[in-house]
Each structure stands twice: as structure tokens, then as C-alpha cells.
Amino acid sequence: MNTHAAAPKGPKLPLAPPPSLWRLFLGFFIMGSTSIGGGVIAYLRTGLVSHYRWLDDETFVELMAISQSLPGLNATNMSILSGDRLRGWPGAFFAALGMCLPGAALMTAAAFAVGIGGDDPISKAFLHAIAAGAVGLITVVLVQLGAKVLGEIADYVFVVLTAVLVAFLHVPVLIALVGVGALAIWWHRPRKGTAPKPADPHFKDHP
Amino acid sequence: MKQLLDLAAVFGYLSLLTVGGGMAAFPELKSLTVDTYHWVTFPELMHYYSLGQLAPGPNMMMVAAIGAQVAGLPGAAVVLVAFILPTGLLTFGIGRLWNRLANWPWRPAVQRGLGAVSVGLVLAGGIVLARGALTNTLTVALAVGVFALLMLTKINPAIPIVASGLIGILLYVI
């Protein structure tokens, strides 16, 4: 847990001492209020690693890998995991609260505002065009996520299989997730002789 | 009361599907809230999704808007708790177990296997959103434009997203 002294490479400053619960909540609340445009993880990295120096990069990447392999929103999971590292379970709770509160409050307010002006064609044109732009953004996320996670051809087969089942054959997501997931995990099952390097936080072997 | 229980059940279930990101749950979000329960129409859902892009924090906080539309403030609160709490507890628990699992031989297999599936789920979510959002040449051009801009530059995604909205208004007005 205490990796304060370990600074193997780079011009690293020592980590700051763990913040008080209030400072922790405030920090996540600020990151939750300013991370506009989808790339919350990038804001989290800048905030946690560079600005507050509450976590080092190695820990951040490790927590990131856990966040992405578990259900739940990545930013929320990251908040829970880093909050727990810093301040135990109250830290996890207040970090997640600070991260989610601003967006959730705004969206709730927006629901009432849309109820008032929802048929206004100009706001419809605005929101419809944003949805189109968001398709472009998701494609970028897919490319980046794919580059990090996908290694061999079989991985791409699992991707296409999952997408076809869900988007075209309308198989319930849970069934696709469990079915293809089990198949993919079995495909990558530990084999005799290729066991070492389990502690590698980057499970990806980049080409 | 029945409605709040339905909201809790639906969003609790949806939260379990968000492996790799909120988008992974989008196909099921659409089919449950639009087709099964008729809480919102597909255009309304897309518009809330768009607003979620503009709001800070996790984009999927837009689920609060669906809860609010169905059952006011209690609806929003129920949806948020149902959407965040179960997976939050799971993450908390696994986070504490993880270090002990460091030498578990199946750990890399689970990470790589679920990684591929989660990319597939995000892809499926993108396809479902694209079906609703890309309805004419303009919207396709906006999607391609945002994609190209974000791939080629390090610009904050909020900028092209807001810009596409403004282009949408501009072309509607003229």
C-alpha cells in the first residue's frame, strides 16, 4: 500500500500524504464537475497523478485495469478503487459521490427543463446533431480501447461475435456477455509452460 | 410505488451490463426503457444521451434524467442508486481481493477474455445509437468529422461535440 519511497524512473515527485475525507470528496467533486466531453479517465489521471499526487502512475494503471474488467462505469469504479486506497471504505464512498453528483444533478435538472421545452424544434436539432457527433466519439473510444485490449485474431472474432449477437440478432446482453465471455476466457486459459508474468499490470502484450 | 420498483429492477440489471463502459448497456437500455416499459421514446432517449455528453462526470449519469421523467425526483434517486450501488459494491470487494489474486493463473485470461467482449459490447452500443442518430447525409458527415478530428488532434472531445450541435441548429435555421 505504501509505495511512497519507490520512485524508479522519471522526474517523479513524492506522493502527497493521503487527503482528509473532506479534501478527498472536494477533489473528486471538482474532477466530476469539470470533466466535460466523455474522457473522464483522462481528467482523473491528470487530477489524481499529476495535480494532487495522491496516486502514482503504476497504481493508476493497475486500478484502471480492474475498473475496465468489472461492470460499472469506468470513472465510478476508478473513484471507488482510488478512494478505498486513500481512505478506506469512507473514501471509496465519498470519491464516488463526488464524481457522480454534479453530472447526476445536472441531468435531473435537464429532465425537468426538457419536459418544459422538449418540443422546441431547435433544441431537437441541437440534440440530434450531438447524438450524431457522439457516434464519432464512440468510434474513437472503440479504436483506442481495441488497440489496448485486442491482441490476436481470435480477440477480434470475439468482438464481432458479441456485437452481431447483441446489435443484429437481439440476443440479451447478459447472455452474450456470459456466453462469449466464457468462450473468450477459455480461449485465453492458462496453459502449462506459459504461466509466468502473472504480476504484469498491463495484461496486454503490444505488438 | 410499482413504477419505482420497476425502475430499480431495470437499472440494477442494466448496471451489471456496463462492462467496459456505459455504452455496453445501451442496446438493452433502449430495448427496456423504450420498447418494454415505454418510459421514453427512442428520440427522447437519444436526446438525453446527447445531454449526457454535455454534462460533466460519467456520461451515463443521463439515466437520472430517465428516472426523473418517469417519477420525478424519487425516480431519479432510485435510478441512480440502482445503477451505481450494486456494481459499486462489487468493484469495492474485488478491488480488495485483487492483490490476493495477483498470482491467480486465470487472472490474465479473465482480463483478456472480458476485454474483448467489452469492446464488442461497446461496438454494439455504438451500432444501436448510430441507427437512431445517423439519419441523413448531415448526421453521417458530423459523425465522420468528429471521428477524424479526434483521431488526428488532441482536442477536448467536448469541443467537436458542442460544435456538431451548433451546426445542427445552423442548418435547421437556414
Image (spheres, rainbow, N blue to C red):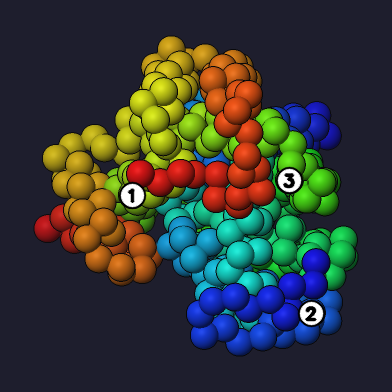
State the image quarter where residue A117 is shown: bottom left
Quick one: label 1 or label 2, which is nearer the N terminus?
Answer: 2
Q: Is residue A13 above or below residue A115?
A: below
Q: Using the numbered discs, state the Cα–Cα distance from disc 2 to disc 3 in whole angstroms.
A: 24 Å
State the image quarter where residue A12 is shown: bottom right
Q: Label 2 lies in what chain? A: A
Of residue B119 and residue A65, the one placed in the foreground of this image is A65
Side of B10 where B158 appears, left or right: left
Residue identified by numbered label 1: A140
Q: Using the numbered discs, state the Cα–Cα distance from disc 1 to disc 2 in whole angstroms.
A: 35 Å
Of residue A132 and residue B3, the one placed in the foreground of this image is A132
Residue identified by numbered label 2: A18
Of residue A11 and residue A171, the one placed in the foreground of this image is A11
In what element is the residue under mark 3?
loop
Residue identified by numbered label 3: B102
Q: Position of residue A34 (x, y in %)?
A: 53, 74
What residue sits 58% from the left and 59% below the top?
Answer: A61
Marks 1 and 3: which is nearer the front? Answer: 3
- Amino acid type assigned to the residue bearing label 3 in the image: Ala
